[in-house]
Amino acid sequence: METTSLRKIVAGLFMSLDGVVDSPENSPKKWGNPEMMSRIAAGIAQADAVLLGPSTYRILAEFWQHQSDEVPMAKFLKNSPKYVVSSTLEALDWQPATLINRDLVEELRKLKAQPGKNIQIPGSPRLVRSLLREGLLDELNLNICPVVAGTGMRLFDEIEQPVPLKLVDSKMYSNGVLSVTYQRVMV
């Protein structure tokens, strides 16, 4: 009997020690170093699609579609299918892109059942929270920056029920950033 495995939805975010994910203090530009970029590139190599919220889609489109394909992240983002979860967007100019504007749970289950590699979420903290609540996020990669931001959007705000996770990998970089990878625990 042949078994098929589902694609994983994998999120990657930079955050402060106090959980803030939208501050300049956590910018990959500020904290990135060659060993961290190598690890991020390895994660990208395991994916063939991108899942985004509307704000992150607009921000990434504005910057990455004009970058050279010699930059691994630019090549990945420009050429991979993008799935954008939004009830407000009507058109997606940065292609290839598909709008998901109804029944998120069902649409993502269908997407995960298709053949392929991981589905990567770069940023999109509101979407990540929603997927955590719905049990649809399979892996969470956090680059925790050695700073307390104080104010800003916190990744786990609005999570009201426990979400069981297990630590599957961790690494400390020379710049003080702690990279941790958690997978969802099936209960």
Image (cartoon, helix red, strand yellow):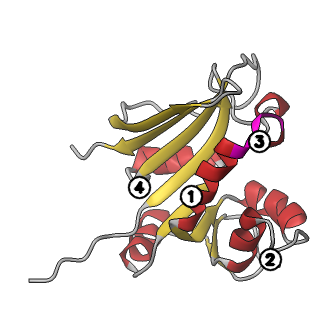
Residue furthest out toward the left: 1
Q: Nearer the viewer, residue 156 or 180?
A: 180
Q: Residues within 10 Å of mark 2 (few under 14, many from 20)?
A: some
Viewer-nearest of labels 3 and 4? 3
The stretch of residues the image draws in magenta is 30-34
Residue assigned mark 1: 42
For marks 3 and 4, the one nearer the N-term is: 3
> In the picture provided, is 173 more to the left or to the right than 9?
right
The picture places residue 137, in percent across and down from the top left corner, at: 44, 52
Q: Would residue 32 be counted in the magenta stretch?
A: yes
For marks 3 and 1, the one nearer the N-term is: 3
Q: Would residue 89 be counted in the magenta stretch?
A: no
Q: Residues within 10 Å of mark 1 (few under 14, many from 20)?
A: few
Is residue 154 visible in the rendered structure shown here?
A: no
Calculate the distance from the C-alpha at mark 1 to the C-alpha at mark 2.
24 Å
Viewer-nearest of labels 1 and 2? 1
> In the picture provided, is 73 more to the left or to the right than 93?
left
Mark number, residue 94: 2
Q: Residue at x 67, y 27 (%)?
A: 174
Q: Under tag 4, what secondary structure? A: loop
Viewer-nearest of labels 3 and 1? 1
Calculate the distance from the C-alpha at mark 3 to the C-alpha at mark 4.
25 Å
The picture places residue 48, in percent across and down from the top left corner, at: 55, 74
Residue assigned mark 3: 28
Calculate the distance from the C-alpha at mark 1 to the C-alpha at mark 4.
22 Å
Q: Residue at x 39, y 69 (%)?
A: 7
The picture places residue 109, in percent across and down from the top left corner, at: 39, 69
Mark number, residue 136: 4
Calculate the distance from the C-alpha at mark 3 to the C-alpha at mark 1.
16 Å
Counting every numbered tag in the picture gives 4
| Amino acid at circle 4 | Leu
